[in-house]
Structure formats: C-alpha cells, structure tokens
Amino acid sequence: MKRVIVIFTGGTISMKKNESNRSMPSMSGEDILKIIPGIDEAANVDCMDFSKISGQQMPPEKMFELSGVINKKIKNGGYDGIVVTHGTDSIEETAYLVDLTYNESKPVVFVGAMKISSDPGWDGAGNLIDAVKVAASDDARSRGVMLVMNKEIHVASQVTKTNTCSLNTFRSLDFGPIGYVDNGKPYFYYKYTKRQYIDTDKIDTKVDLIKTCCGMDDKMLKFCIDSGSHGIIIEGMGRGNIPPKMVRGVEYAIEKNVPVVLVSRCISGKVTDDYGDEGSGGELREKGVIFGDNLPGQKARIKLMAALGYTKNVAEIKKIFEENYY
Ligand code: ASP
C-alpha cells in the first residue's frame, strides 16, 4: 500500500463551533482522521499537525516554512505523496508558493472544506479521501502541486476561489481542471506544461499589491515605495491598462529599481501590450513594467516574493515572469 502523510494546517476542515456559535479551527489531525471512515483504505496514512489556523492567518513566512517541511518529508520521509489541509481563503496562495519551490515528482495535494464537520453534507471527508487517493496515484506524479476539492483536480498556479460559500468554488478559469476523482479513482485529462520552479532558499515578503479602479492616482504606489516595498504588483484593468494618473508612480518605482509586475483585475486571461495610449500596457511595457501573464494579483505577489528571494536583479526577475511569454 502507498504511504501518504497528511499535514494539517487548519481551516474549515478542522473547525467546530465555539460557545458563541462561531466556527473556529479546533480539531487535530488525529481528531479529523478518526471521523473519516475508509481513509485508511485509500493509503497507509500518517499525520502531522503543522498549525491550527484559518486561511487569513497564514503569513508567507509560514507558507515557505511549510514548503521546507514538504520538501524534507518527500526527500527523507519515504512517502509516496503528501496531502496538506488548509483554509480555503488562502489555500491557492500557499499551494502556489509550494509549487514554485518544489522540484520533486511525487504528488503534493492541497485540500480543504467549505463546511464544518457538524454541518449536514460535510464535504471535508470526501475531499480528504479524494486528496489521499490523488497523492497515492502514480498518474499524479510530475504534475506539481495540485488542489483537490469537489471531485476536481486543479494545478496550483491556475486554481482560484471564486465563490464565498459554494462547494463548487474552486475553478481554473482559463483552462479548467486537469482531471477528476470519479468513483474513488483519479483520472487525468491533460498535463499543464507551463509550471515553473524557482530554486530559492528564502522569500522576500516586502511585496505590495495594488488594485486599480477608475480615476486612481499614484498615492498608493508612492506610499508603498517610500515605506520600503521591494516589489509591487498592480492589478490593472482588462488587458493590462492603468489610470493615467498612476503612471508617474510606476515611473517612480522603476527609477528606484523596484520591480513592478502588471496583471489584470479580470478574473481570467493574460495581460499584453496591445494598446498604446496613456496608461496602457504598451506604455507601461516601454517604461520597464514586467508582465505577469494570467495570474491573479495575490498569486503574482507570491511569485514575486519567491523571485525576489532568488535574485534582486530586475532583468532576471523579468525573465522569471516572462519566460515563453511572447
Ligand atoms: N475561513 C476559512 C479559512 O480559510 C475558510 C475555509 O477554510 O474554508 O480558514
């Protein structure tokens, strides 16, 4: 039988109601495994408690520490695969950081739940069993870090939470899931080929994210630079355009050698330099702005943290972001 370790970090999958009837992460890994009959038929399962926090409490430093634990367990633990439980609010960020810093072939699968275990129709049990099955599957090898929920298998770089409460919240809006778990068996339909590895032993968390809206000026950009930002992500409009009054702030960042990465506030699609008027992607590209493909802002931020951990050289960072871009 395959050996899988489940690393518990917290989130709704581990929650119970407190005295005020509010959900709180309370259960240990062992408590959770005990209420999931049949999980030991999916694999030989070990468990580890890494933390007991909600998604919004997960800082990037802890995500990177988790990546270190995962890499060690895979190299020295004798496991065939790893499952990580996580709060769904930020699961995509942690999964993506681990994906960018994981270069092994064994599967790493993130999983969560949208309901707590006392809710009717708890999704945690089924999701966790499916995740263990994917982690134990030979077909799941060399696919990087994945997220398994609601029967779907997604790659970490593409999946995003789209709805605050639906069981069907996780979507890969541009290309869809790479597979399904059907009747307890994982089926893969395609391989995501644009996965990236950043060989870094640290991250730089001083990266800020600014979302654009009509009429915005450069106040936030200037504030970020003046207060010590090492990198800025701008969620621009559409194909990657920003209000003209923000452009001066972009120039200010670039003058100070702070990398500025542009993505879109649209929920899918990549940014390009098609347009050439004031505030357009074309103008920004000429000024030295780096293009962040189809990543949402929160994931572009994670990538820039890893890239800045690897190098402070803006040209190299541009290469990391724009590899095979045009
Ligand atoms: N607020 C919760 C969290 O991210 C939601 C969840 O786990 O699904 O921890």
Image: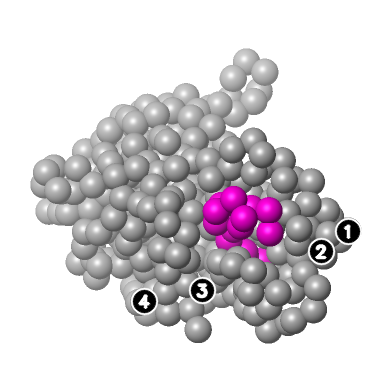
In the image, is residue 87 above or below residue 96? above
Q: Is residue 252 magenta?
A: yes
- In the rendered structure, find residue 243 and report the number of the disc placed on it: 2
Task: For the residues labelled 2 and 1, say whether their Cβ atoms are less than 8 Å apart.
Answer: yes
Q: Earlier in the sequence, mark 4 or mark 1?
A: 4
| Mark 1 nearby-residue class (10 Å; few <14, some 14–19, many ≥20) | few
Q: Which residue is mark 1?
A: 215
Q: Nearer the viewer, residue 247 or 142?
A: 247
Tell me the mark number nearer the camera, choosing from 4 and 3. 4
Number of residue marks: 4
User: From mark 4 to mark 1, how far is it between C-alphas?
Assistant: 38 Å
The amino acid beneath tag 3 is: Gly
Q: Nearer the viewer, residue 185 or 146?
A: 146
Q: Earlier in the sequence, mark 1 or mark 3?
A: 3
The amino acid beneath tag 2 is: Pro
**Mark 1 lies within 8 Å of ligand 1 (Cβ measured):** no
Q: Residue at x 21, y 59 (%)?
A: 104
- In the rendered structure, find residue 176 and report the number of the disc placed on it: 3
Q: Earlier in the sequence, mark 3 or mark 2?
A: 3
User: From mark 4 to mark 3, how far is it between C-alphas?
Assistant: 14 Å
User: From mark 4 to mark 2, how far is it between C-alphas?
Assistant: 34 Å
Q: Earlier in the sequence, mark 2 or mark 1?
A: 1
